[in-house]
Amino acid sequence: MNKKLRKNLIIAAVLAGNLVLLVAVVMFLLTPDETTQSDISMPISVKPQDKPRAWQKINTINISTETAHTLAVKADGTLLVGDDDGITFYDMNGKKRVSIVLRGGIVALTSDKDIIYAALPRQIIKIAGKKLIKWPEFDSRTRITALAITSGTTGKTPEPQASRLQKSHRQDAYATMAGNAGVPPAVSFLFIADAGNRKVYCYTVDGRKIWETGGVEGETFIIPSPYFDLAPDGNGGIWVVNPGRHRVENYSATGKFKALWDPVPAKTMLGCCNPAYLGVLSGDRFVTLEKGLVRSRLFAPSGKVINSVVPESDFAQGVFRYDLAILPGDRVAILDGFGNKIDIYARNKGQE
């Protein structure tokens, strides 16, 4: 066999082999897959049903301002919204009733029947009908963050309703009485939280200072950021948030430190300074509005979390522009300054 013929035979063999391989591949690809779905055994992921929420949103009130800072509620359920230009009143149906023009930025509000107390950063304004009474300005370090009205009591101030609240071994607040100011019986007091000076002041409603406190001696208020809230305790005294210590302290109308509340376990409250805002429901249960991881929760007097009022998934996480107020019937109102609205929540039946 000559050399040229051998070469041609080799080439032909290679081509034939490639052709057989090509045919085999084509036949494999064209063969129908007879495997049925029932032949496939693999785990099936089933999405669990969402746990029923303890609270539900029952109303949303749209507000006509983009600079809302603070929210308060009158005894009749009227909502008060403070912003850069003053105060706007809304009824529970969301109808705008009246506005009061007050320049300078309203940072806190409270009411005593038909009298409104509004705070600018360094000044209190008393509003009685169409009459505005401006109190003297506080010092340049002052940064008012919260107001609360409580009713004084004659004789011994009752203890907070919840006996499970922790009683401190320290019986007295680091409080200073003002001049000859005694505590008048059965009157209302205006409490003022000042984040700039890290103090709480107690005034009569006509502007006379009774006492001030920087907290418990040796455990004073820690205020890393301008969130320093107050809530009446229902017994003439006041609950004061000590945000840097992640706890809430109770003071009588005379300035006596009576009890403290803190969440359990200790790291339940996250961030540098929480709760940012506080509300008290019946039975000395606490509603918090927390910043950092923005959420609202309900706590028992023991400090244990009862449930979530509004989970973090329902809030826009970022710059914190919210406020909290308690409505009649233990309903919770949350001001959303970014969304220009007030969301109102009520507990579902069967929930604590």
Image (spheres, rainbow, N blue to C red):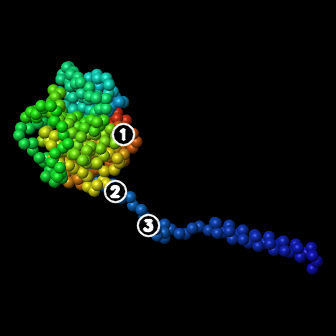
Q: Amino acid at mark 1?
A: Phe
Give me the residue at 11% from left, 46% from top: 159
Q: Which residue is mark 2?
A: 49
How packed mark 2 is, by other alpha carbons closer than 10 Å (few <14, some 14-19, many 20 or more), is few
- Estimate the spatial distance between the alpha carbons at disc 1 and disc 3, rounded to whole Å: 43 Å
Q: Amino acid at mark 2?
A: Gln
Contact between marks 3 and 2 (CB within 8 A): the answer is no
Give me the residue at 24% from left, 51% from top: 262
Percent position (x, y) of residue 241?
25, 43
Secondary structure state at the residue bearing disc 2: loop
The circle drawn on residue 43 is: 3
- Estimate the spatial distance between the alpha carbons at disc 3 and disc 2, rounded to whole Å: 18 Å
Q: Which residue is mark 1?
A: 320
How packed mark 1 is, by other alpha carbons closer than 10 Å (few <14, some 14-19, many 20 or more), is some
Percent position (x, y) of residue 117?
21, 29
Which image quarter: residue 6? bottom right
**Left or right, residue 136 beside residue 2:** left
